[in-house]
Image (spheres, coloured by chain):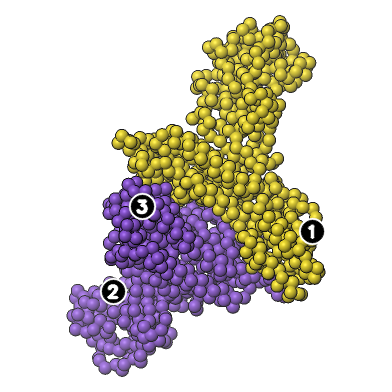
Chain colours: A yellow, B purple
């Protein structure tokens, strides 16, 4: 590949509307151009990187035994209605009417269509297990598309759907996919973690996410120093608290005229924040509920929604709060409600003694509150105990270690779906006994275009992108100084290029005739891992100037040392 | 590849709603499954073929110097309005409103977006010429989707857009693309023709189509026996007629009470159909026009629309006909109109003498009509001459040969667009003198998914598909008889598979354990070019049973002869 024959177009200006490093660098390197909000054209340079990711994903999926197929991007509404997801997906689903007023959507994922394909294709257990995957454009109508291809509306995704007769077979394929994903991200050269995700309706170890570690990541990941336990914030669990201390204080009303937060109340009373209790008023199907977490903890809405009876809860209105507690927000507490309420206490709250709660009177809190004396014993009817808080940095882990938090960018997700989709689509096969059995299903996604941005978030410096070798547009670029002035230099460079390519390297020749400074700046900006300079002076001395993208200095190497370095 | 690990699912039933052979065979072979009207899922088998076509197209585009990029499938309305094509495309354009009520479409082609990309990317003539291509899903909301992937709504297309400073450079790239396309269709192993297409607004040799020859083709292609002249019906031109004979008959009114067609009139009068003239009444911007073609010729609407003043014409209404000619349809003619009319005579009509026209009176025609005597001399104001008819089988060609007609399926189109899109999108570069110059543009399309269907239309028999080698899912399949019964047979088959693969063949092993009849029928249906059977008996004799998909008989070959045959 000669760069004079390749369209490369970098810019020095930092785009004003790009907030994220990867977005800025992809625009400056000329990898993408914006067509409209959340819609990007991939330039030849950008597409080269995207295709390298795509190729590795395809190879590892095939190595894992999956077979590729392809579903249309445009799918009929009826299909999505069979599972109720037409409604559930909400406005993220891009809806379309065709010329005959039939309604369709642009596929944001394809469980329904895959299950429908399985219904048509699979009739006997002998055809199982099978795992179909595709690599294809998807669309999610994000309310605020931003961060370039990190959160674009149209994006490239690998999605796979496996079908099984028995649950154990599904679990085996799930483990097989986890291994394949680990191989993919390892081959891509990324620092990644597999974390336990919210397992949704299925429970157990049925959903895991793959994250690229980066400070700019949107997701908080929780790790234990004591084992390889890792989970996303939604699912992470700290160790259960120790036994509850005995009550030692008398209950007392305290004046907190302007103190509406736990922080303010604790400061006023000179107590630690962990002695206070936060009351969150919500409405569930069964009525009004007060959820209690420690003042220094944050409620976890996913966990709260999984407590029996709280699925689909919403925040209570001020009117509902006034009706049940007789108070305005800021001074709420579980003691003496106006109307009967349900209490859901976090595990850590249930282990507290002598704590502070709102008094359900404006400007007042109650201190020295104790379970069993002032409030019903947790675990008795109407007063439930559950883990409903976010794990936090420094928490004790269940394995005895300490919890640490890192930031990650989600790039993969594997899921044991069970039988809900196959049931809805009537995808059955005849089992060993000739009876119709609903298929068990797994699904496995990888955000191909997002990986490109995530890799940049993890690997860059002031000069630009630093690609991991496997994702780089070219592994090595041979730069020619003054190609037109000296034909022997050009010939030597072309010879070296051929030699590198023969050694199996994805190499290119920068014969664009730029001045050295501009040429080197381009190569650094677009993140080429290895740069070799061929110059008249070097040729005279029998050396090439070599620089690794991660090194601060160039070095002079003869041909043999250079080849050894690049192929070693 | 072991077929037991690959999802293959053929059916014996002929699908009732499939009219076309390729549609039927693709469904029976299990290459595609219908998701909704005009929307098809590509099974692993179908996708394997599609990818082979895609790979060859990509390789030849790259060899020709084009660089790959990718444009979103979803594109903003504003972009399409800059060129007026939002309206022009009409209901074929799938229109979409997003959650913010912004309007988009699913790209059916991408000239606007490509020109917009060029506007952002190209600033100097030094970056030219450049040819960007992509391979991507497209959508056309066909009013009657049918014939499977031949005329699907969502389909896979290769589209390329080249940019140039000078017209000569555009012409050079156009020729380069024509060569690349010829290489592509040659490599695919298809019988194809490049034909001149309607050149639209640009004129000259600026648009050519590539057709796969097949009896079921929708398009009529016109060839000359005298040269390599070939054109589609819209553009094909016959030789100009010879000089006009002298008038020899007197003009006379003839009674044709029920004879409303040229055929009926000619039969009644005992004349050849080529002695009659058909009058077509149309309305143009300039008013009422009577277009005249010989009774045995068909008017060509594209050619007629290119006559000066007739762009965008429509058929005249009965009221308009009555007002201008004083008659009902069936008896129309150019003589003695009620109001002044314009006459456009086909070249062949202008060369007629003693001909028959309608009398503009119900039940009457006029015979013995002659130009210059009864009607104004063609070529004088108000009476124009032009080629406005379809060329037909047996016509004399301009090169002295004879015109022949064949049927074709359009699979490629190359076009010199000129500067209209770049002008509308303001895509300019600085030329050698530092002045802004609007880019000249070419576009080049290939219907990747349609090629798969077209290849089947051209290559099939009663047993199924007969793939050209380059498109086949596998070039050769090794079939094992009773794989579970005799391990030495399985081992020998696996050894042969490895040997074939080492020889560079795309080979698979049918180890599904089907009975020979069912296995062979599958291989014939899915069109595998070469089949090798490994059996206990054959092994004992030191032979393999080989059969070419196009041969009627199998033959026994030893290992060496087999390898020679397959790699020869």
Look at 62% across and 40% down and name the residue there. Answer: A211
Which element carries disc 3, helix, strand or loop? helix
**Quadrant of the rendering where the N terminus of chain A is positioned:** bottom right
Q: Position of residue A198 (x, y in %)?
A: 56, 31
Left or right of residue B215, residue A509 in this image: right
Residue A304 to residue B429: above or below: above
Front position among marks 3 and 2: 3
User: Do labels 3 and 2 touch, CB within 8 Å?
Assistant: no
Look at 49% across and 64% down and name the residue there. Answer: B56
**Residue B548 seen in this snapshot:** yes
Which chain does tag 3 point to? B
Residue of label 3: B489
Q: Nearer the viewer, residue B556 or A535?
A: B556
Upstream in sequence: badge 3 or badge 2:
2
Residue of label 2: B327
Q: Nearer the viewer, residue A111 or B46?
A: B46
Q: Position of residue A328 (x, y in %)?
A: 65, 19
Residue of label 1: A555
């Amino acid at each position: 590949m000669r760069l004079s024959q390749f369209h490369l177009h970098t810019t020095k200006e930092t785009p004003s509307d790009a907030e994220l490093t990867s977005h800025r660098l992809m625009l400056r390197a000329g990898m993408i151009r914006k067509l409209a909000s959340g819609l990007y054209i991939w330039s030849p340079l950008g597409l080269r990187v995207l295709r390298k990711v795509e190729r590795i994903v395809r190879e590892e999926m095939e190595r894992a035994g999956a077979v590729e197929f392809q579903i249309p991007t445009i799918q009929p509404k009826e299909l999505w209605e069979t599972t109720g997801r037409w409604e559930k997906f909400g406005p993220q689903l891009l809806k379309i009417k065709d010329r005959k007023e039939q309604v369709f959507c642009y596929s944001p994922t394809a469980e329904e269509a895959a299950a429908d394909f399985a219904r048509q294709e699979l009739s006997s257990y002998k055809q199982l297990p099978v795992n179909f995957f595709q690599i294809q454009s998807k669309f999610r109508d994000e309310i605020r598309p931003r961060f370039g291809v990190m959160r674009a509306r149209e994006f490239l995704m690998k999605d796979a759907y496996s079908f099984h007769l028995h649950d154990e077979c599904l679990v085996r394929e799930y483990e097989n996919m986890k291994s394949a994903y680990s191989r993919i991200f390892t081959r891509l050269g990324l620092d990644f973690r597999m974390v336990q995700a919210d397992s949704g309706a299925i429970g157990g170890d049925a959903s895991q996410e793959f994250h690229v570690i980066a400070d700019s990541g949107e997701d908080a990941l929780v790790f234990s120093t004591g084992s390889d336990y890792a989970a996303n914030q939604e699912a992470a669990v700290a160790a259960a608290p120790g036994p509850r201390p005995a009550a030692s204080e008398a209950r007392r009303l305290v004046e907190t005229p302007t103190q509406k937060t736990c922080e303010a109340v604790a400061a006023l009373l000179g107590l630690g924040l962990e002695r206070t209790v936060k009351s969150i008023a919500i409405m569930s199907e069964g009525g009004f509920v007060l959820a209690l977490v420690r003042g220094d903890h944050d409620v976890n809405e996913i966990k709260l929604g999984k407590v029996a009876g709280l699925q689909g809860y919403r925040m209570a209105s001020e009117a509902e709060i006034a009706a049940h507690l007789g108070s305005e927000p800021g001074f709420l507490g579980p003691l003496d409600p106006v109307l009967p309420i349900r209490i859901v206490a976090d595990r850590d709250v249930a282990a507290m003694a002598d704590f502070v709660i709102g008094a359900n009177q404006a400007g007042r809190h109650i201190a020295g509150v104790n379970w069993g004396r002032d409030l019903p014993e947790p675990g008795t009817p109407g007063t439930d105990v559950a883990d409903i808080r976010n794990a936090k940095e420094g928490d004790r882990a269940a394995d005895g270690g300490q919890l640490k938090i890192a930031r990650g960018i989600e790039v993969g997700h594997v899921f044991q779906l069970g039988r809900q989709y196959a049931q809805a689509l009537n995808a059955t096969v005849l089992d060993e006994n000739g009876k119709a059995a609903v298929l068990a299903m797994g699904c496995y996604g990888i955000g191909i275009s997002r990986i490109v941005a995530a890799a940049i978030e993890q690997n860059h410096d002031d000069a630009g992108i630093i690609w991991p070798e496997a994702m780089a547009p070219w592994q090595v670029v041979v730069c020619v100084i003054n190609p037109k002035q000296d034909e022997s230099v050009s010939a030597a460079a072309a010879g070296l290029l051929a030699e590198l390519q023969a050694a199996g390297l994805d190499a290119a020749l920068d014969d664009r005739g730029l001045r050295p400074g501009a040429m080197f700046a381009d190569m650094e900006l677009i993140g080429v891992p290895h740069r070799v300079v061929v110059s008249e002076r070097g040729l005279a001395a029998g050396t090439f100037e070599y620089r690794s993208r991660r090194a601060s200095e160039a070095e002079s190497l003869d041909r043999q040392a250079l080849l050894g370095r690049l192929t070693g």
